[in-house]
Each structure stands twice: as structure tokens, then as C-alpha cells.
Amino acid sequence: MVPGRTRRPYSTTACPPTPRQDSQGHFVDLAAQADAASVPLLRPQSVNSSDTVVALKELDPDYLLIANFQQILCEPVLVVPRRAVVNFHPGPLPRYAGLAPFFWMARNGERDAGVNALITMPGIDDGPILAQRPVALTATEAVGEIRDRLFAESATCCMR
């Protein structure tokens, strides 16, 4: 814990991507949602920069939770939380590890998808799996439809 600071039962910090539209045309702006909930916001150019690592350490987290995060976390970030960095991955592992698994599932006409919560390790999507949830597809969904379904399902991995 940071000296002189009382530990809160929990805290949250958002590090959202650039605002974008989902497949239904809804504008998704996590920064606005974080601001409305009085959640501190970090939007670093590089999550592995020394300034970002210092800012994360100052938060004194038990966990860092990441989802759809398109940067590889290096050792200085991975050791910041007391317990773990947990990644919510929108695709069945290990078959669809890596970036944009929903694109590859649409391209391959998949019928079996899934979401995972896993401990983040130095490799890409290769840490121990904490929770998995299967998701059935029809093999006809577009990339955005699969992405939106899997992102929504990922939240259920956090609820268990």
C-alpha cells in the first residue's frame, strides 16, 4: 500500500479505447461512462511506459482487469497488482488466441465460440484460465455481431 493512504475496499480505474460504434450503430464511449461514475481515467499511449507503470503502482491495485486491450503487457505492468492481471478474452482458447478472434470466427464460419477470463502472463493469451463460457453461433453472423455477443458474454465471466 502507498504510505499515508487508507486502503479503500475497492477502487476502479478505466483505461478505455477510443470511442467507437458497435455493430448496431450505438456509440460506445467508456471514457464518458467512467467520468459519469467518477472513475479515474488513464489513456496512455503505451501501457508499458514508465509513466504508466508509476501511475498504476500509485493505484495500489489487487487486480488489473483488461478486456479487448490491444497492447502486450510487459513484466513491469504484470507485477503491479498484488494478486493478478485478469484478461477477458472474446474467443475460445487456445484455438482463437490473439487479436480479433471474432474476425477469424466469422471468416471460418464457426458454430462454437466462447469467452474466457484468464491470468495474464508474458505470452499472448496463454495464462491459466479462471472461467470459460461457451457461446453457440449460427456460422452466419457478421464480425460485429460476433464481437458484440462475445463482449457481452465476457461480463458473465466476471460475475461468477
Image (spheres, rainbow, N blue to C red):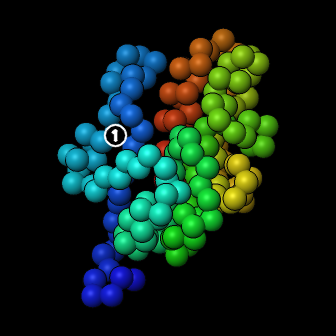
Residue under label 1, please give it.
30
Could you tell me which residue is drawn at 42 percent across and 38 percent down? 17
Position of residue 46 relative to residue 78, above or below, is: above
Tell me residue 104's x, y (percent): 71, 24
Question: Badge 1, how many Cα within 10 Å: few under 14, some, many 20+?
Answer: some
Does dot 1 land on a helix, a strand or a loop? helix
Quadrant hosting residue 109: top right
Q: Is residue 114 left or right of residue 69?
A: right
Q: Inspect the image, locate mark 1, and give the three-letter code of the amino acid beneath it.
A: Leu
Q: Is residue 39 left or right of residue 2?
A: left
Q: Is residue 44 left or right of residue 4?
A: right
Could you tell me which residue is drawn at 63 percent across and 27 percent down? 102
Tell me residue 66's x, y (percent): 51, 51
Q: Compare residues 122 and 139 and report the one nearer the observer.
A: 122
Residue 114 makes an appearance in the image: no
Tell me residue 146's x, y (percent): 58, 24
The quadrant in which the N terminus is found is bottom left
Name the residue at the top extreme: 140
Name the residue at the front extreme: 50
Could you tell me which residue is drawn at 30 percent across and 42 percent down? 31
Tell me residue 2's x, y (percent): 36, 82
Name the residue at the right extreme: 95
Position of residue 46 relative to residue 17, above or below, is: below
